[in-house]
Image (spheres, rainbow, N blue to C red):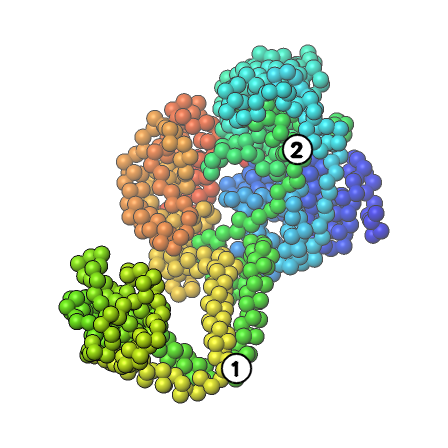
Amino acid sequence: MISTPLPDFDGLFPFQLDDFQRQAIAALEAERSIVVSAPTGSGKTVIGEYAIYRALAQGKRVFYTTPLKALSNQKFRDFRTQFGPQKVGLLTGDISIERQAPVLVMTTEIFRNMLYGTPIGQVGTSLQGVAVVVLDECHYMNDRQRGTVWEESVIYCPPDVQLVALSATVANGEQLTDWINQVHGATELIYSQQRPVPLQFHFCNPKGLFPLLDRTQTKLNPRLRPQGRQSRSRGDRHRNHSETPSLGFILRRLQQQEMLPAIYFIFSRKGCDQAVATLGAMELLNPQEAIALKQQVDQFLARSPEAGRAGQVEALYQGIAAHHAGMLPAWKGLVEELFQQGLIKVVFATETLAAGINMPARTTVISSLSKRTDRGHRLLTPSEFLQMAGRAGRRGMDKIGHVVTVQTPFEGATEAVYLATAGPDPLISQFTPSYGMVLNLLQIHTLEESKDLIERSFGQYLATRYLAPQLQAVADLRQDLAQTQAKLEAVDLNALNSYQKLRERLKEEQRLLKILQRQAEESQASEMAMVIAYAEPGTLVGLKGKPARKGSAPLSAVLVHQIPGSGQFPYLVCLGNNNRWYVVTPTDVLGLQGTLSTQQWPPDLDPPAEMILKPGPSRAGNESTAAIASQIPPLDLQPAPEVFAQQQRTAAVSAQLEAHPAHQWGNHQSLLRLQRRELKLQTDLSDRQSKLEQQSQHHWQAFLALIDILQSLGGLQGLTPTPLGQAAAAIRGENELWLGLALKSGALDDLDPHQLAAACAGLVTEVSRPDSWTHYQLSETVETALANLRSLRRQLFQLQRRHGVVLPVWLEFELIGLVEQWALGTEWPELFANTSLDEGDIVRILRRTLDLLSQIPHVPHLSPELQKNATRAIQLLNRFPINEVQEAG
């Protein structure tokens, strides 16, 4: 329990606070920043609301940031009701309402951009009077496209401003808290696994709806285990499509067991719309609910007839709706409002609905446990699953929230149990330097200060932790190297190296000598085979070491007999001066050295009778042959000249080696091993340090690569932003340099406002589907203006590829004709009828275009005519349904 005195909360909230909420409030009262990691639906927003109450009571301001415009819009509406219309403002890039209000709701990106112009650690004019910044849904740090924004926001935010980071449960909340504590100030982790409304997991197959888990809530319900010889193979399941229960079957089970209202997650817009069409006639409302719902829908359609979702109005009257990014925001807002009132019983939604939008349900149904991504088809991550599951259970209304997983051809109960019982994923860093970051930092910071900032990122913090084993390995290598060098400190390494070179030279000379000797022997053998065949008995010969034993010295002998051999040459029967008999071939003879008279041995001289007269084992002589053997003179064969010369060189090197000072040390072999170890340690250390530097300075190297590109294209003069660089620094976008180059090029200066709108759409529009189309052709003037940017785009793209920079350089021609038509006054139904895009996609393109156009008047060094036309283009585009939020405000 918390012993810190807490303020009186009576009347502030209409419910009892949980322990983790009270702990968070106590930390705020102690002037500490907090990281709140708790399950979806557990009441984290209450902590953000308390921070607002507290700041307002102190006469200060609060910034409340969210990752999505839709979520910012919802918080804006909720807070205006809660705190009063005059106290709450909204800032989302294309919309600005009451921006000086004490409570300002904004996207996290807008907050980051505010901080760019202020030196790190200082309070600029934009943060004057701000006591607290709430970073809602901060687990979006994991988002590949948006993650950098959170890290920059924490790093840039002045330490006097409290941070309230609200996150779904993550596995490494301690690391996130420790990092914020290091780069921002005293921060406390508030962690909770408790939900006010506990979840119960179910599994639905064609046989019915069953509990997913056993009594321990950790393992599969035994009833769901495969029975008998039922195949578990993926191939068999894939063929048995009947294993997937129908939508009607699932909804009837939910209705029978009073598990509505439900959010039914389907991972495609088309799937959501098809589900509505399939179930549109199903009656889920009682008469009173049907009347109340119809009244509100009719009022909405009377106000905004263009906003009605084609093909879904009748289903809405039955309490069935879809919710996804392809819809008009006005229609989605109606669905959200009706669902919150309990008048819609099932919403078929894409995963984005799980991202913090306030639409709690009694039940969530997750139609598939895998989904398609730009990196292939994969199983949901535990955090994705928990985020969707967490929408189940309405606080104060339900005792239990229900999560239903569904049998599909590809996943079954086993996968569902894994996701239901797995812990959340850890936060990872998506920190990536951008042109805007480089330019904004270099406008007010030195290169060293910029490097310090890069090294304060969460990505660098994690890298340092994860690289700890490599850092220890480097430290160990350094210590080992130092010890080895200490042992070699008293050794004359020059002398040792010269001695080693002599040893290596002697080995080489000896190797050459052996080669020459072998060549000389082979040459002599072939010649001797011809000569010896005609030799007379009594000829003195020199035999190879083979008869005496392989490897021994040559032997002096006398030829006694020649006998037929196995080939063209005879065998030679010889008596050696060692009084042993040998049978050899002519190739065993090294040379001739005179004769021994036959009078010196008896005429009947023969080898022992038991001796086999074939080359092979020798036999000992007797006493009479001993007298003859004693008369055989020693071998006196002269080597070949080249062999003799090599013998001389070898002897000279050997003499040098014996005379070398190191020869007397006695331990030169161990010293040489030590020296080799030293060299290996130095190589290993250098290699590890190089790899470690690449890993640990990855972000800084990316920062330097962007500097090189900016310098090449004129955005930086040295490290000082040029007019082009200053223009790019003032732009928000996914590639600020590309937008700056396009706007500064002059190619767009002479376009009329409607043409400029289309051209700007071409710079910020990404066509995600290749089969998208529109019947509206782009005007020739706009097409020519954009075509003039192609060479500039190619140049930037090539530079980025050379430096390994992956940032989009969009130049779209195909779909932006509809932006020009909208600016020319085409009505919404006609515009929508002439494209394959969903209404939500059209709204998104137009709002992205508006976002860029709204920046142009504030970007320095642009043509005044361009800035004036941008203002006029905004007026042409910003009409219903594009400006619906602003009208609602």
Residue 707 vs 525, above or below: the answer is above
Task: Tell me if 528 is positioned left or right of 685 in this view.
Answer: left
Q: Quadrant of the C terminus?
A: top right
Nearest to N terminus: mark 1 or mark 2: 2
- Frontmost of labels 1 and 2 is 1
Nearest the eye: 886 or 316: 316
Which image quarter: residue 337?
top right
Can the viewer see residue 400?
yes
Nearest the eye: 435 or 459: 459
The secondary structure type at the circle numbered 2 is: helix
Distance from label 1 to label 2 (Cα)? 63 Å
Nearest the eye: 377 or 857: 377
Q: Give the residue type that dot 2 points to.
A: Ala
Q: Position of residue 717 (x, y in %)?
A: 38, 63
Residue to which mark 1 is pinned = 489
Q: Position of residue 163 (x, y in %)?
A: 66, 51
Residue 229 vs 390, above or below: the answer is above
Which image quarter: residue 597?
bottom left
Residue 420 is labelled as: 2
Residue pictured at 71% horizontal, 50% vertical: 189
Q: Give the residue type that dot 1 points to.
A: Glu
The secondary structure type at the circle numbered 1 is: loop
Task: Tell me if 794 is positioned left or right of 719 in this view.
Answer: left
Which image quarter: residue 753?
top left
Check disc 1: other Cα within 10 Å, few if <14, some if 14-19, many if 20+: few
Nearest the eye: 711 or 576: 576
Residue 819 vs 259, above or below: the answer is below
